[in-house]
Image (spheres, coloured by chain):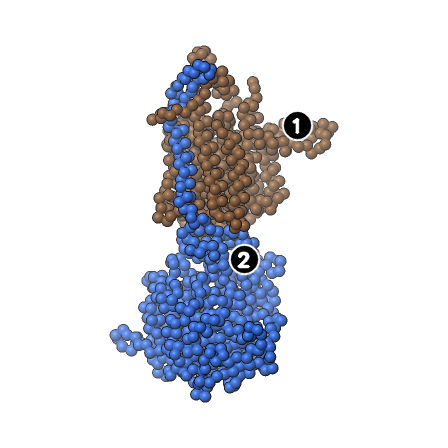
Amino acid sequence: MLLSSLSILIFAPIYHGLAKRTPGKSHDDAFYESLTLHPLPDGRMSVLFEFETIFSSSESLSSIPQSHHSLTPPSLLLPLKANNVSELTISFTSGWDQIRSSSSGLLNYESSGGGGEIRGWLKDGNDIENRWNAVTNALGGLFCAGLGSKDLGDNVRDFGNIYRPKLDVTNTSHFLLSHPESHLCTENLTPFLSLLPSKGSSGISALLSQPGIIFSWESQSEGIEVLMPSGDGQGRWKGWWEGVIDLVPEKGGSRRTSISKMFNKKIPKPFPEVQNSVLRLIVEDEGLQALPSGLAKQEWIDGKIRKVLEWDLQNSTLIGGDIEFWWDGEDRFQYPRTIDPPPITVTRTVIDRVASDGTFQIILSNQDNYERKAIYSEIWPWWVKGWMSEVELLVGNEQKPELLDNLHYNPSTPPKISTTTLHFYLTIPANSKLILKIPFTKLTLKYTEHRPDAERGIEISSGVLTLLDTLPESQLAESEIFNSRRTGRKRIYTNRLLLDVPTPDFSMPYNVIIMSSTVMAVFFGLMQGALTRKWGWVELPSVAEKVVKADDGKKSD
Amino acid sequence: MLSSSRHDYFPVPVLYLAFFQSPTKPHPRDEILPVMDLATIRTSLKSPQGVLCAGAAIRLALFLGIPSLCHALERRPELSTPLTSFRSLKEGVFIHDQGSNPYDGGVFFHSPLYLLFFTYIVPVSSYLLTLLLWTSVDIGSAIALVRIWKSQNSKRNERKVSLILALFLFNPYTLLSCLAKSTTSIDNAILLSAIAFAATGQITGATFLLALASHASLYPLLLLPPLAMLLKQKSGTHLASPVLLTAVSFVLFCAGLTGIIYLTASQSWIEQSWGVMFSINVNDLTPNVGMWWYFFTEMFDHFRTFFLGVFQLHNLIYVAPICLRLSDDPLFAILIQVGIISTWKSYPALGDMAVWAGLLGCFPDVVSNLRHPLFTLTVHLYTSILLPLLHSLWLLTGTGNANFFYAATMVYGLNASLAVVDALGAGLRLQVKKQATDALLREESEDRKSDGYEKDPEMMDEIWEQKGWSVVQFASSII
């Protein structure tokens, strides 16, 4: 069945999906798109656009090197091919900092923490660093955002364990470049749409190509993921755009909404080449109704069996129409007093804050009745110097150093631009709050190393909690309806942090150079005088009769 | 013979002693036990052993009594730089224990000697052992100072020994450095012991310890020439070429130490430990009391290398002139060179000033000839209030900016520089006085011993007073 195969496409690991969907003609490209709506308990709705293109390697067709592109954008794939990239993920996320780890976390699991991030696997070989730089610079241009590193030292090389390869290709190296200061802005939408075969003029992408609407959403996330074909195999590239809409009107009221209300457009005509174009609604609570009604089914999503309604948007009865959503008997939305927390949450704050020092406090809380194994990872710029010997692990007020199984610490090499990376291999006990405290010092930056808006502070990348004990969510166990381990959400991100840096006086360089040099000159002059001048004595017998007797003094030198 | 009232140049230790002499019993004279006699306690506290015991006691009492104070002092940038701080040392040992190389990142700048010592011999995590180490290190420094003084003065003078000990042990800079467990204290002890060995003519001990000190903080390397001169002066004529021997043994010890470190650790420490301190990268710009950090924070990038060269050479250029001008008194040359290093090194701390002040205590004649000791002392008092105050304004509350702390360090640096110049001037004045008095005494009576004034500086001052003579620095140059 087409729809069930699509669900696998979206939520199953790609190798699984690829195996299932190997088309008969090996060189046909295929394009799939979907729009997922997920009402959240706090009266908002998550909206996720996903566009996926399956393409095949065209090199083996003839002996002359050539490439054909029908649905795939050459501007995206050619730099990757030229630089021997195996996998690449770029994502921009903004506005999620406060809600990242809660149940309203991103629907797309591949979106990174706050800000921009580019990561990927490159095939080993010569100039791997240069090739990586070439890729980041080429794609930075594509996304109207500086994706490239300011310095080679910005690249993080030890996150391969966190972002494991999806393709079965050996001899690859992982690169990651984090830009926590980046934001998603209007300039990112046009290049994103231009990568899509439908170019924002038809299909679901027509709903997306409205900057005025899309950028009024409070939280945004966009990203692409490219798996390059190896040899004769197939590749895949997927783009996604996600946002959160507030359904409750400002003055209060019901959450009733519709496609045209959300996007100011009726359901657009489908893109002719599309294989599959589907609208999905994840129904969390009974009472959510839709008209015309979609096809209902049960699906295991993010640790839970959920009811999903699906509409085929290629269906001619829907084109040009609208789909309405409402909650039965809701006149005025009542905000729930409590929202069930997700099984694992991570928050990060700075405590014991003084201008030059502080302590990162990371609270990892586990609501489940079983302990979890996880890696907590951080990326810091070079001027954040952690004190590993003073790291504390607490449950309540009790020290629990045994919960730290292992610590991988790769310190930066100041003052060269470089990163510190940390991986804490942790056991999070059942039903408890694990507190990780990392004291740190902010090193003094040279005045040229400060940003133009130095007083604003500098962002620190999100921390990542990687769960090591997750199970595939496609395996439906009959007996269970809830198991937080069965999820594709392997990584939970913390918020970004804005650290203020102690600043020097930027107007002082000349003054400091002049004053310090003066002190040095005074010292040198006095020393030189004392060492080179003659010392002798004078006799002052009385005030009236001054006989000055000078003597050279028999100097030994 | 008058007691050397002129040489009670520093009333502070007397106050310290008074503090320790405060009676614990209401009326000690009524006590039968002579131990409880106040007078006995006072006498025993005035003896060198008493001062040493009091110095050790106050350290142990503060370490054990107010550990929170010691913990807070560990973080003070005035007392320990990233190169000498106990916190960094703990961090380095921790990383080493984890099986990683602490020199891989910009985390650890201490000498590998310290890393090995605090990993295998005195575990850095043991509060008791480290406090005992730092206490004994200060006692060792004090004993070395006494040995230096005794090598210059053959006459026994317990009172002066006590004074030298008290001046060093109760100097707040020494005391606080010790409580902060700054490795500056250990560097100082090694350096003072090296000088003490040199002052008694023991080439092996002196060169080994100087090599050790140079490994730990590199700048003591600049003391090799005056130290060789001192060894030449002290080792007498039974050695053919003491200077050459000194140089050779120093190089051998240095090579030996480097070899041991090379075998036990990797070579990445050179860049991290010596490189940060000395070579072209003053990497860590953490504020300290020196003149470097703000200068290189504010420095334009394309002039950075040039000024690093200037600042490093500035330490170097004084070695030759001082050795030439003060060739008749190498120990005094060492004093001046130590003063220059402690003021102008790349990462100075207050502990560096303590070793200079302690050495100065071994030269009572120089101190009595200082032009402005009160000024120096009061400015030190002033900066010791200003430095923590302005540091907290900038780096703790975040309300001030870097200029505040920079201003305080500049006052401190200028004052320390002027004090060094003052000491040099005093030494040269003393030299002239001695020569003139010598000539005068020889003139007056041929049979009188010409070196009489050496044992009695009081008499020399009296003669000068009577004659109405005073030493002046002329405008003309000796060259």
Which percent across, then down, holds residue B468?
Answer: 47, 17
Q: Of the numbered discs in the image, which one, if any, rests on residue B55?
A: none
Q: Residue at x 45, y 11 (%)?
A: B445
Chain painted in brown in the figure: B
> Which chain does the numbered disc 1 sit on?
B
Q: Tell which of B389 and A530 is nearer to you.
A: B389
Q: Nearer the viewer, mark 2 or mark 1?
A: 2
Describe the element under mark 1 as helix, strand or loop. helix
Which percent across, then down, holds residue A261?
Answer: 49, 79
Instruction: Please state the total of marks drawn on the protein image.
Output: 2
Q: Which residue is mark 1?
A: B40
> Which chain does the numbered disc 2 sit on?
A
Q: Is residue A431 above or below residue B123?
A: below
Q: Residue at x 72, y 27 (%)?
A: B29
> Could you tell whether A164 is left or right of A335 in the image?
left
> Could you tell whether A48 is left or right of A128 in the image?
right
Give yes or no for contact between labels 2 and 1 (Cβ–Cβ under 8 Å).
no
